[in-house]
Image (tube, helix red, strand yellow):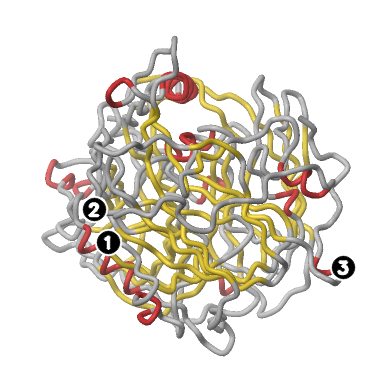
């Protein structure tokens, strides 16, 4: 059977809160990242995987609130690449944000680039990942920011446990992406979900590749949960245990206890788990943790489940986590794949902490409201091409019927900085209003327009965006990520957004603050932010297949009147196209 993998923050020593001083001066923390291939075997399939420093998942970055961060990335493979520090605000340092052709040209083979930025007024769990094509399937890791102040909850933490969900393909992920783009088809589903890179014993040949974490009765642990999966929202639960949510997307929440969580791609959730079970009781000393997809799509998907174990200490050999079939039973508190009711209740339970130290600064008034549809599209097949989408057409996706196209001659940020012509005319309302969530999924004309049209706003704009799902092809839960800004989810609902009625129900007291919002299936989400970070910022669906199809847009925040409100000059080592 082999011995299970035992991970401890991927080889990096954890810093325990009790060892941190209550305040500390800003320091410069440096990291060296080498992009390189590594042979990795999962599910009895060996393939070359793109990695950082040969680690899969990648190394954990640990910094402190207020630190200056420098990460030198050297590309040692014959592929272009970039890295994105997901959720880091990048105040005035958009050059370090990372999405290819948005804020930088890629790092070419043999090239290097040092990402430099400061952690300003952020603390908690974020993550980093490649931001070119589907490279983030294996190039990702945790980004942990320790706070200056003690945690705003009194529970003593034994230690942190990062839990990163991912997806594994037996085949070449780059080839799957290329085939999808060439023929306009849907991608092949992944072959497994993973916990910290390990699929677990429910998959073939994978008992040895199982995540097992040892815990001690009576102790409380901080689980830093990250959904790095490419194309699936996931439910997560631990057998016989409850979870107390204390943070989302590196923002503290009002604590609440739940039997499970739903986390969308791009999102992070910190929960407290107390080891309150009897390791000598009838359930044994090993308790299953499990993640499986939240299904809102009619497209083919990976309908499997990944599991790992919390193993109580001390534990004798008769209670080993990986022996005995009964230990493989899924937690009874794990929601069913189609449990939209649970996903909705969980989202509605999230509230900003709103304390004196961590106030909720939601804009009560707005300067501008943008309403955008989020649609899948079906494009007529061009002459003399082979198309393998539905009805022999091509799948695309769009926002307000604009399918985003990256320009490869110069990044949009550099074009903006050098006053090179861009397209500042993203439509601020749907160009052709219709019954967005009541339309026949396949009977309408679903062709889209293509381009790089940008939404441009002055510095300091109090912006509201309403993200409206549509029925085209099928309604779906869309995780929309905004770079360079946090936002407040002031409203959510099913059906069509009603501008005359729905704003009256907004939560303007303690709405959750995030960087990625899961727009309800067949519904809408209203978010508010202050555009106080100059630069060009990518807004896109974090289901990678949808971003590939064009479900994205660009937000340009112009500089303000004072130098402190303007983008810094580009670094000398910024890659060129």
Residue 407, percent across and down? 67, 33
**Rendered view: 488 above or below 575:** below
Residue 296, percent across and down? 26, 48
Relative to 92, is 283 on the left or the right? Answer: left
Residue that mark 1 sits on: 495
Q: At 57% across and 79% down in the image, what residue appears?
A: 150
Task: Name, please, the residue furthest toward the top.
Answer: 384
Instruction: Return the residue nearer the eye: 252 or 93.
Output: 93
- In the picture, the quarter occupied by the C terminus is top right
Residue 80, percent across and down? 66, 27
> Is the Cβ of the residue at disc 1 closer than 8 Å to that at disc 3?
no
Residue that mark 2 sits on: 438
Q: Quadrant of residue 205?
A: top left
Relative to 530, is 522 on the left or the right? Answer: left
Separation of disc 1 and disc 3 at Cα?
Answer: 44 Å
Q: At 79% across and 35% down in the image, what residue appears?
A: 575
Instruction: Return the residue nearer the eye: 73 or 8.
Output: 73
> Is the Cβ of the residue at disc 2 closer than 8 Å to that at disc 3?
no
Task: Name, please, the residue furthest toward the bottom.
Answer: 356
Q: Element type at marker 1?
A: loop
Classed neighbour count for the residue bearing mark 1: other residues with Cα under 10 Å, few (<14), some (14–19), many (≥20): some
Between disc 2 and disc 3, whose residue precedes? 2
**Rendered view: 477 above or below 216:** above
Q: Element type at marker 2?
A: loop
Residue that mark 3 sits on: 563
Q: At 46% across and 43% down in the image, what residue appears?
A: 398
């Amino acid at each position: 059977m082999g011995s299970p993998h035992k991970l401890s923050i991927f080889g990096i020593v954890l810093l325990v809160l009790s060892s941190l001083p209550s305040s500390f001066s800003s320091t410069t923390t440096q990291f060296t990242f080498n992009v390189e291939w590594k042979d990795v075997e999962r599910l009895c399939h060996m393939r070359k995987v793109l990695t950082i420093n040969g680690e899969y998942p990648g190394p954990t970055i640990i910094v402190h609130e207020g630190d200056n961060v420098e990460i030198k990335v050297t590309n040692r493979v014959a592929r272009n690449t970039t890295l994105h520090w997901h959720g880091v605000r990048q105040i005035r340092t958009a050059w370090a944000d990372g999405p290819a052709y948005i804020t930088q040209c890629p790092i070419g083979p043999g090239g290097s680039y040092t990402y430099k930025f400061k952690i300003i007024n952020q603390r908690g769990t974020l993550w980093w990942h490649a931001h070119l094509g589907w490279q983030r399937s294996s190039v990702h890791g945790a980004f942990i920011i320790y706070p200056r102040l003690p945690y705003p909850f009194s529970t003593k933490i034994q230690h942190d446990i990062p839990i990163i969900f991912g997806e594994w393909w037996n085949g070449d992920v780059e080839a799957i992406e290329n085939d999808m783009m060439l023929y306009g088809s849907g991608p092949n589903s992944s072959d497994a979900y993973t916990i910290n890179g390990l699929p677990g014993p429910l998959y073939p040949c994978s008992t040895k590749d199982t995540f097992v974490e040892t815990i001690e009765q009576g102790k409380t642990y901080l689980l830093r949960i990250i959904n790095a999966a490419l194309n699936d929202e996931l439910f997560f639960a631990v057998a016989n245990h409850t979870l107390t949510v204390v943070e989302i997307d590196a923002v503290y929440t009002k604590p609440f206890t739940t039997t499970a969580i739903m986390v969308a791609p791009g999102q992070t959730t910190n929960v407290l788990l107390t080891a309150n079970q009897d390791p000598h009781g009838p359930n044994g000393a090993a308790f299953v943790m499990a993640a499986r997809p939240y299904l809102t799509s009619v497209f083919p998907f990976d309908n499997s489940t990944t599991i790992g174990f919390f193993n109580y200490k001390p534990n004798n050999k008769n209670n080993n986590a990986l022996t005995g079939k009964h230990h493989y039973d899924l937690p009874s508190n794990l929601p069913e794949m189609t449990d939209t009711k649970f996903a909705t209740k969980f989202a509605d339970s999230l509230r900003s902490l709103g304390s004196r130290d961590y106030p909720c600064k939601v804009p009560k008034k707005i300067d501008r409201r943008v309403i955008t549809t989020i649609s899948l599209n079906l494009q007529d097949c061009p002459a003399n091409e082979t198309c393998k989408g539905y009805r022999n057409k091509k799948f695309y996706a769009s926002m307000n019927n604009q399918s985003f196209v990256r320009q490869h001659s110069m990044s949009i940020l550099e074009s903006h900085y050098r006053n090179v012509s861009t397209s500042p005319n993203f439509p601020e309302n749907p160009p052709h209003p219709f019954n967005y969530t009541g339309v026949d999924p396949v009977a309408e004309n679903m062709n889209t327009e293509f381009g790089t049209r940008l939404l441009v706003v002055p510095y300091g704009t109090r912006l509201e965006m309403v993200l409206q799902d549509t029925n085209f092809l099928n309604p779906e839960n869309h995780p929309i990520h905004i770079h360079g800004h946090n936002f407040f989810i002031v409203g959510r609902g099913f059906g069509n957004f009603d501008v005359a009625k729905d704003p009256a129900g907004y939560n303007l007291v303690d709405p959750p603050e995030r960087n990625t919002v899961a727009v309800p299936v067949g519904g809408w989400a209203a978010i508010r932010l202050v555009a106080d970070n100059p630069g060009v910022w990518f807004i896109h669906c974090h289901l990678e297949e949808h971003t590939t199809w064009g479900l994205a847009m660009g937000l340009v925040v112009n500089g303000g009147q004072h130098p402190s409100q303007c983008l810094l000059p580009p670094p000398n080592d910024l890659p060129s196209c």
